[in-house]
Amino acid sequence: MRVESLGVIFKKVSEQKNKKDKIEILQKHDHQGLRIMLELLLDDNIKWALPEGPLPYTPNKQLDCEGQLYTELRRMYLFVEGGHPTLQQRKRELLFIQLLEAVTPADAELLLAMKDHKAPKLYGINKKLVDEFKQGGTVKQEAHG
């Protein structure tokens, strides 16, 4: 079974007109990686330790990297305030650019929107929607990557 990238899943959610359909898509793709992304997206306590605005990166053109962001989620702490306090800012930004270049273009767009606090509005996802999704679903433990 081919894994859909998180960016594609979020785009599918954004294309839905009503809350019920958005929740159904989230439930269809419910797994730990999706829940981590939703937390990173909506938790007001998470502050990104990266500059706002575009970053110079070359979008990935590989066709087989849909699961790459799932693998990279364990390193997201590097890009939030307090996650790795001794990491130099220049190195943090370089690592983020490398991440953007390693994932699908849709995932890179999602990460950039998250970093700039635009993702909830861009993808039509809010805390109320996510709370309803979490109440109705169970997490699937899937291997990705």
Image (cartoon, grey):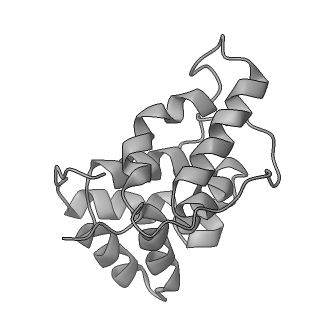
Q: Is 53 located above or below residue 83 in the figure?
A: below
From the viewer's perspective, is 34 left or right of 45? left
Spot occupied by residue 10 in the image (x, y as percentages of width and height): 47, 69
From the viewer's perspective, is 40 left or right of 24? right
Residue at screen point 59% across, 18% down? 84
Spot occupied by residue 126 in the image (x, y as percentages of width and height): 52, 62
Residue that sits furthest to the bottom in the current view: 17
Residue at screen point 31% across, 51% down? 145
Residue 50 or residue 128, whichever sits in front: 50
Q: Is 81 located above or below residue 109 in the figure?
A: above
From the viewer's perspective, is 49 left or right of 137? right
Q: How many marks?
A: 0
Residue 127 or residue 33, whichever sits in front: 33
Quadrant into which the N terminus falls: bottom left
Spot occupied by residue 62 in the image (x, y as percentages of width and height): 49, 65
Spot occupied by residue 94 in the image (x, y as percentages of width and height): 71, 35
Residue 80 or residue 64, whichever sits in front: 64
Can I make out residue 49 in this image? no
Residue at screen point 73% across, 51% down? 116
Residue 143 or residue 9, whichever sits in front: 143
Residue that sits furthest to the top in the current view: 86
Residue at screen point 68% across, 44% down? 97
Can I make out residue 44 in this image? yes
Q: Is 60 located above or below residue 40 in the figure?
A: below
From the viewer's perspective, is 39 left or right of 92? left
* Res 140 → quadrant: bottom left
